[in-house]
Amino acid sequence: MKTALLYLLAIGLLSSCVVSKRYPQKLPLTKTAADYALFQSILQEDHPGIYWYTPKDSMDYYFGRGKAMLQDSMSEPAFRNVLNYVLSKIRCGHTSARLSKDYGKSNDTLRNRFFPLVLKIWPDTALITQNLHRKDSLVTRGAVLTAIDGRPMQQVVDSLFQYLSTDGYNLTHKYQTLSNRGSFGSLYTSVFGYKPSYAVDFIDTLGQPRRAAISIYTVPKDTTRRPMPRPSPSRKERRALDLAANRSLRMDTALNTAFMELNTFTKGGKLRPFFRQTFKKLRKEGIPNLVIDLRSNGGGNVTNSNLLTKYISDHPFKIADSLYAVTRNSRYKGYQQSVFWNRLFMIFFTRKKSDGAYHFTWFENRYFKPKKKNHYDGAVYVLNGGNTFSASTLFGSAVGFQQNVTLVGEETGGGAYGNNAWLIPDMTLPNTGVRFRLPLFRLVIDKEQPKGFGVQPEVFAGPTVEAIRKNRDYKTEAVVNLIKSRKDTCVTGVVTYAGDPLADGFGWVINVSEESPPIIVGINLPAAYRVEGLKVEACVYKTGAKVPCHCITQPDGYAIRTIKRL
């Protein structure tokens, strides 16, 4: 028995030694060169958009540059950086490299050391939003960072952009990626290296130029001050917390506005019942304004994005002019994640056309009809930004030009013309274990859109130094100001039902006088006021939408701000 226990202990010690020795081990050139050659071949044969923005001769040049960057005894993060440098030149936001699974399980001490500054970055500005050294009274939140180790911040940002993928020529997504918590520091140390300290130049909150040295932040090993452990939430409670983090609805009764926050379109978020309950509630309560916040929505399932569009769109819409893969049976499938299911999908849902590509014809030029039940016809404001990506961009593309929809914020991170996506398996390189995402389909959303840019806002609301320092939600502020600026018209009249809207009627209206056209308020007349002949006083405003009818001129749609009986 003792011998067996000693044997098991020895095995455990040996296995832990293997893990500790493996990282941060260096990769020999024989391994990185072999994996790089495979990486290049996979992209050249299987990536559906490899030459969409960058011509072949230019990509060949970048492949050569990447190969020249390989060195003997490279770290795995350094090799990953080489791959990301090359991938960024494809200009596909869904194609990027990441470290191996083994590296993630390792005890690499570098993972406990961080560049201490968190930044919000936009053109010409890098604002410090947090210093991990909380007791540092010199380099504080709100200071504008101008240089690190003598490199001007514009030079630093331009250098880091070389390792970030985006759709086409879109820079909003790159700026936002660097602004996401931890991203700047992680990429900066990966590219420029870890140091015990960094010299930083900055302009403090009083407008004075300053210089300081900041040390690398190391996670403290002392656990004596850890807070008392709290009871873990139950599985049901965790599920509720996860759902609330993914989607939520709040009502602002003073503004008569609903705020819907959607942070994902992925499966598992129970979005179908959430949408059904939300739009039923909006109809019953007659809410005239809806704000849909997609700023943190990186995409997900197209079915969920389509479902939201059906509740908002006032016209049949499509999501694809073309959708195709360049191969159905890759000779590199042995390196592909979920290859069985991907292959099954290709066989049953794609069809080869005369151009030699395999088209997913079910979505190509197919028009989807808006919902009739609980369809929302009020004023809609969509908040977009650099993290608005993939499937969330499809929504903005479909409804953005409607009269009752206003896009607020910044250009979306996802391309309005199209992207490479749909099925996006990881490809694992055999010698290093480093992985990269490989989209299998090329999607042209709208061939009439400018190529290489995101969905543009109608009302731009971007960051400012003052707004970030004061922790203001400047995009939501812009929407609230838009809603408050709508001009109200206060009238007295009689409520009457002017026919079923589905049968070319106008629904509920307020007849102001026999000479004037009725004010059509069917979208949000509260149920308690839907009484034939009821005399009311109401303050209303134009939603921007026209009421569909077989008329020479379609009448304006109105929404009620306030209403009372007379």
Image: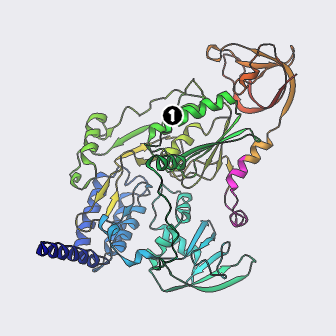
Q: Point out residue 18 in the picture as x, y percentages from the top left corner.
A: 23, 76
Q: Is residue 150 left or right of residue 258?
A: left
Amino acid on which disc 1 is placed: Pro
Q: Point out residue 526 in the picture as x, y percentages from the top left corner.
A: 73, 26
Q: Helix, strand, or loop for circle 1?
A: helix
Q: Residue at x 35, y 36 (%)?
A: 360
Circle 1 Cα neighbour tier, 10 Å, few/some/many (<14 / 14–19 / ≥20): few
Q: Residue at x 44, y 30 (%)?
A: 366
Which residue position holds label 1? Answer: 273
Q: Residue at x 72, y 75 (%)?
A: 205
Q: Residue furthest front?
A: 1
Magenta stretch bounds? 462-479
Q: Is residue 140 left or right of residue 91?
A: right
Q: Point out residue 566 in the picture as x, y percentages from the top left corner.
A: 88, 22
Based on the picture, tell me whether residue 472 belongs to the magenta stretch: yes
Q: Is residue 11 left or right of residue 413?
A: left
Q: Is residue 320 visible?
A: no
Based on the picture, tell me whether residue 548 belongs to the magenta stretch: no
Picture quadrant where residue 300 is located: top left
Q: Point out residue 271 in the picture as x, y percentages from the top left corner.
A: 50, 38
Magenta stretch: helix, strand or loop mostly: helix
Q: Is residue 170 above or below residue 28?
A: above
Picture quadrant where residue 56 is located: bottom left
Picture quadrant where residue 514 is located: top right
Residue nearer the viewer, 117 or 519: 117
